């Protein structure tokens, strides 16, 4: 198996049992007038992350590596948000903003709406796996684990927004489910650099490995290693 030059130490990878996970690369989190922008958070790093994610998924598709898109999204009536008895109802940003401003109801990460959609540069293809989620982790209340196991996937390369929230939440659950999680550090972002770096360190110390996108793209471009 090829060996990735990862942190905190190199790791052997079987690309035939690997997938790229694209977490919440939606207008809500990466576009002007989306949820994070409306909340006054810094999304200035999003264009660079979008370009980086695109390079990763293009390289993966050339080697027939599965690409998994996770999308945060609620029904317009928020019936899948957990309700007042759920901590998700009180902590998840979109629900909080919609509950505080009636003009936003049904507009923030609502299934079918602009905010919910994957950014134009990264639109899923028919062969990609798309999983809609209502919690930070892509494994919570979804079929993600079943779908990955059906495909024989053991190694997961993580990209997306936000590093310290939905990306790290999904990566931690992957670790608990005995997947091998690898965070592509420059293909993910938080709304502040300190939070991003804290998640990178947390992954390296406790939950997985990190690499730059150039490491994966370069390995996938090497036929002898990609077979």
Image (cartoon, rainbow, N blue to C red):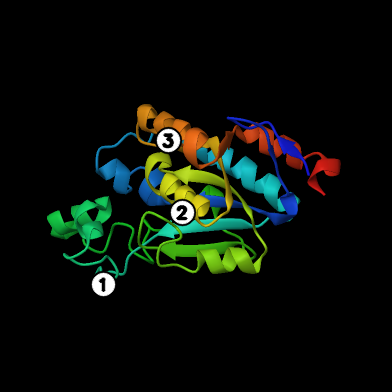
* Residue 87 horizontal/vertical position (percent): 22, 58
The quadrant in which residue 129 appears is: bottom right
Residue at the location (48% across, 57% down)?
A: 70
The quadrant in which residue 90 appears is: bottom left
Compared to residue 107, the image places residue 56 above or below, namely: above
* Residue 152 horizontal/vertical position (percent): 67, 63
Q: What element carries label 2?
A: helix
Residue count near mark 2 (Cα–Cα under 10 Å), binned few <14, some 14–19, many ≥20: some
The reply to whether the C-beta atoms of the residues labelled 3 and 2 are less than 8 Å apart is no
Viewport quadrant of the N terminus: top right
Q: Mark 3 points at which residue?
A: 199
* Residue 163 horizontal/vertical position (percent): 43, 40
Mark 1 to mark 3 CA distance (whole Å): 31 Å
Q: Mark 2 points at which residue?
A: 173
Counting every numbered tag in the picture gives: 3
Q: Name the residue under label 1.
A: 79
Residue at the location (39% across, 37% down)?
A: 190
Residue count near mark 1 (Cα–Cα under 10 Å), binned few <14, some 14–19, many ≥20: few
Q: Can residue 3 be seen in this view?
A: yes
Of the pair 21 and 62, the residue shown nearer to us: 21
Residue at the location (63% across, 30% down)?
A: 9
């Amino acid at each position: 198996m090829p060996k990735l030059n990862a942190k905190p130490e190199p790791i052997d990878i079987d690309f035939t049992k690997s997938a790229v996970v694209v977490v919440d690369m939606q207008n809500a989190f990466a576009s002007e007038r989306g949820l994070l922008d409306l909340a006054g958070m810094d999304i200035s790093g999003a264009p660079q992350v979008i370009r980086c994610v695109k390079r990763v998924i293009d390289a993966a598709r050339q080697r027939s590596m599965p690409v998994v898109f996770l999308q945060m999204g609620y029904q317009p009536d928020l019936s899948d948000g957990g309700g007042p008895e759920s901590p998700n109802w009180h902590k998840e940003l979109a629900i909080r903003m919609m509950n505080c401003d009636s003009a936003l109801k049904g507009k923030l990460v609502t299934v079918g709406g602009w905010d919910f959609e994957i950014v134009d540069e990264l639109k899923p293809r028919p062969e990609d796996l798309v999983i809609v989620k209502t919690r930070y982790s892509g494994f919570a209340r979804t079929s993600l684990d079943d779908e990955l196991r059906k495909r024989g996937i053991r190694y997961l390369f993580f990209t997306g927004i936000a590093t310290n929230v939905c990306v790290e939440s999904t990566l931690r659950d992957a670790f608990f489910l005995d997947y091998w999680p690898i965070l592509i550090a420059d293909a993910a972002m938080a709304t502040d650099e300190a939070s991003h770096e804290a998640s990178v360190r947390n992954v390296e110390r406790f939950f997985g490995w990190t690499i730059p996108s150039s490491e994966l793209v370069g390995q996938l471009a090497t036929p002898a290693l990609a077979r």
